Image (tube, rainbow, N blue to C red):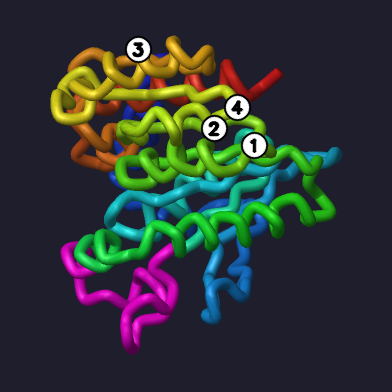
Amino acid sequence: MKLLFTILSLVCSMLAFSQTDLDVLEQSRRHQEWVELESNGRTLYNFVAYPEVPDKAKVFIVIHENRGLNDWARRFADELAEKGFIAIAPDLLSNTSEGISKTSDFKNSDAARTAIYNLDQDQVISDLDRVFDYAQSIAAGTGEVSVIGFCWGGSQSFKYATHNPNLEEAFVFYGTAPVAMEDLVKIEVPVYGFYGGSDARVNSTIPDTEQKMNRLGKFYTYHIYENGGHGFMRSGAQPNASPENKMAREKAWEDLLGLIQF
């Protein structure tokens, strides 16, 4: 009997790790919806996931990678909702290319990536302001809003912290910081970084960022996950995840929740 139970547990674990991001989304019990906001003269699409909780919840703005608002970015928003938070994931590629309404309309992730790097930075900040205003207005929310981003979105999360003093915190996953002191000096909220140990490109910028933030008296602290690669939160969630990325993802979730669940 004990052996049978062990075998069944192993089978269940194997099935869980064979699920795609879309599978996880479609099996979620939580309320998910698309919200349309007008921003910069166009429709900005936002994926919103709500937790199953009796009280009002803190809100997170989830900023996607340079691949746009794909299934994984929406999955992460739903996972945040699973932990008890309202998550809003704006598609910052919404109606920025002719004939394309959302990230899912691009022919592949390379095309989405090209479009991301053609975005105007002022427009991105303005879009995030619009999302922030909406986040504060949600009746089921506490009015507290934090930002969390990944890769390109991690850099945008750091950048947005230089712009919006009304954020609660900024969480930066393997994104680089603004270089200019005149930008960093504007930060009035804690910034938390999460980096993979095998991501020399991004990690080479950390010492300079830390030195500048310390010199300015700004709060900046970070975790580096041994052998985790760039994008470990996404890669570590996939059926073919390496042990290193899987472990980095699990530990980063643990550390993130330790910061926001209080």
Q: Measure how far apart labels 1 and 4 are at the Cα level.
A: 7 Å
In front: 50, or 15?
50
Instruction: Write down the region rendered in magenta.
Output: 92-111
Q: Measure how far apart labels 3 and 4 are at the Cα level.
A: 17 Å
Three-letter code, disc 4: Val
Three-letter code, disc 2: Lys
Q: Which mark is residue 186?
A: 2
Residue at numbered disc 4: 189
Q: Residue at x 49, y 31 (%)?
A: 171
Tell me if mark 3 has few (under 14), some (14-19) or many (20+) residues whose alpha carbon lies within 10 angstroms of its own. Answer: few
In front: 189, or 22?
189
> Which numbered disc, 3 or 1, marks the residue that appears first in the sequence?
1
Three-letter code, disc 1: Pro
> Which numbered disc, 1 or 4, marks the residue that appears first in the sequence?
1
Classified by dominant secondary structure, the portion drawn in magenta counts as loop
Q: Is residue 212 above or below residue 113?
A: above
> Which numbered disc, 2 or 3, marks the residue that appears first in the sequence?
2
Closer to viewer: mark 4 or mark 2: 2
Residue at numbered disc 3: 211
Secondary structure of the residue carrying tag 2 is loop
Q: Is residue 100 magenta?
A: yes
**Residue 98 figure quarter:** bottom left
Q: Measure how far apart labels 4 and 2 are at the Cα level.
A: 9 Å
Q: Is residue 236 left or right of residue 252?
A: left
Q: Measure how far apart labels 2 and 3 are at the Cα level.
A: 16 Å
Q: Measure how far apart labels 1 and 2 are at the Cα level.
A: 8 Å
Secondary structure of the residue carrying tag 3 is helix
> Which numbered disc, 1 or 2, marks the residue that appears first in the sequence?
1
Closer to viewer: mark 3 or mark 4: 3
- In percent of width and height, residue 118 lies at 26, 65
User: Total of numbered circles in the picture?
Assistant: 4
